[in-house]
Image (spheres, grey):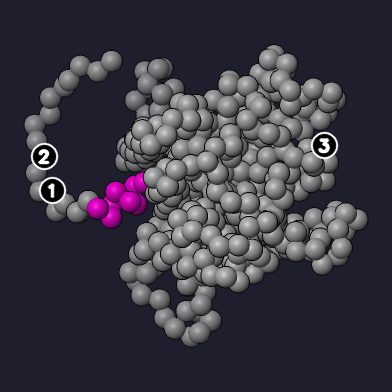
Amino acid sequence: MLALSFASAILTGAVLLCLPFSTASPISFIDALFTSTSAVCVTGLVVVDTGTKYTLIGQCIVLILIQLGGLGIMTFSTLAVIYMGGSISFKFHLALREALNRLSVANIIKIVKMIFLITVIIETIGAVILTIRWAGDFPFLKALYLAVFHSISAFCNAGFSPFRDSLIKYYNDPLIVISFSSLIILGGIGFTVLIELTEYRHTKKLSLHSKVALTTTALLILGGTIGILVVESFYNSPIYQNKSFWDMLQISFFQSVTSRTAGFNTINIATMSTASLFLIIILMFIGASPGSTGGGIKTTTFGALMASLWAIARGRRDVQFFRRRIPNELLLRAYTIALIYFGLVASSTLLMLCAKDFGLLNSLFEVVSAAGTVGLSTGITPQLTTAQKVFIIFTMFCGRVGPLTIAMVFITTSRKETFRMPEENILIG
């Protein structure tokens, strides 16, 4: 149900984007499919410029697809059924639980309503702030449209922008940098965390999940900011030339935030050093938190893997977080997700290189950006061959729905085991 809901939205969006009222000039179906997939999967990779190739109607279609993909088609389906007076089956409850990365179906309908309300509030606040900022640069209606488009795109971690050069001309604008960064972070920490934060005044507690997600997110943002700042300064990068330390800090911070799944940029990514590009690849691979609008293996998965390595290195029997023991089943799931993502990235990169060689770094960057539903690119996206577009479309779809979900679609569930095989050791390492 989860995979089919996204696939249906993508195909519908592709058909709509092919129609004459959506484009300023004719567009191929593969390009429309690429754009629709990128929008529904909240990625942001584009083969044609959104602001010039699509009409206002076409851009609105892209925006609707972003909102559907960010919150999840099943979330909107649930709201529609509820407000039409229908009932939700238990099977749909289970699918909805999986879509929202919940541990149980308890209060799932209430949670869906809260997710929708939180989204409306955050996106509205973002749109108001951006409207005020752009009102002096554009006519009011255009400023309002740009503000709404970017607020939804940022909160959904999509990275789409009607501006040809994304946010490059605003690299030293504190209001733009802080507004977009806040929207991206709030959209990427996950709705479970957002709900617990809104209720914290009454409950005075956070779940282990929220603590791990918030801690890992903060460390990744801080580490990414320092890493990019140090590396680009060491290589005397052109992105820092004739810029103050404050401007350099804003650029590094924003790129650290957006690299984990949003896809906006305030600099030309292609001009960054190889070391910084590799650091961004790592951030894109990790991604956002579970139950969020972002992709990647997720912050909690990365945190569980690091905690597991730390426990093994110190000879501990249990993996612990904040004085709580992590079940082995969750650790096994974390390793499985990381390995499937690695396999997806490796196979897609190999296929990309076979179709047309843009160089290992450029191809790997593009694939990880697609798998992590990020949207950053070194500039090769418009030059992709038809075969490479198909590979990237599939990678974006797997990255948004989740490789584990895709695997479950094609692998038949085995019967419950009634016995276990004898245990024997093998040599490891």
Q: Mark 3 points at which residue?
A: 172
- Earlier-in-chain disc, 3 versus 1: 3
Q: Which of 294 and 309 is in front in this view?
A: 294
Q: Are marks 2 and 3 in contact (CB under 8 Å)?
A: no
Q: Residue 420 carries which label?
A: 2
Indicate the secondary structure of the residue bearing disc 1.
loop
Q: Nearer the viewer, residue 336 or 205?
A: 336
Residue 394 placed where, x, y %? 39, 49
| Span colored in magenta | 403-410
Decide if residue 115 is in sight here: no
Residue 215 placed where, x, y %? 59, 36
- In the rendered image, the vertical position of residue 17 relative to residue 52, given as above or below: below
Q: Are marks 3 and 1 in contact (CB under 8 Å)?
A: no
User: Which of the 4 quarters of the picture holds residue 239?
Assistant: top right
Q: Give me the residue at 71% from left, 34% from top.
A: 267
Q: Give me the residue at 79% from left, 41% from top.
A: 169
The amino acid type of the residue labelled 1 equals Glu
The amino acid type of the residue labelled 2 equals Arg
Give neighbour class at mark 2: few <14, some 14-19, many 20+ (Cα, 10 Å): few
- In the rendered image, the vertical position of residue 224 relative to residue 388, given as above or below: above
Residue 417 placed where, x, y %? 13, 48
Q: Residue 417 carries which label?
A: 1
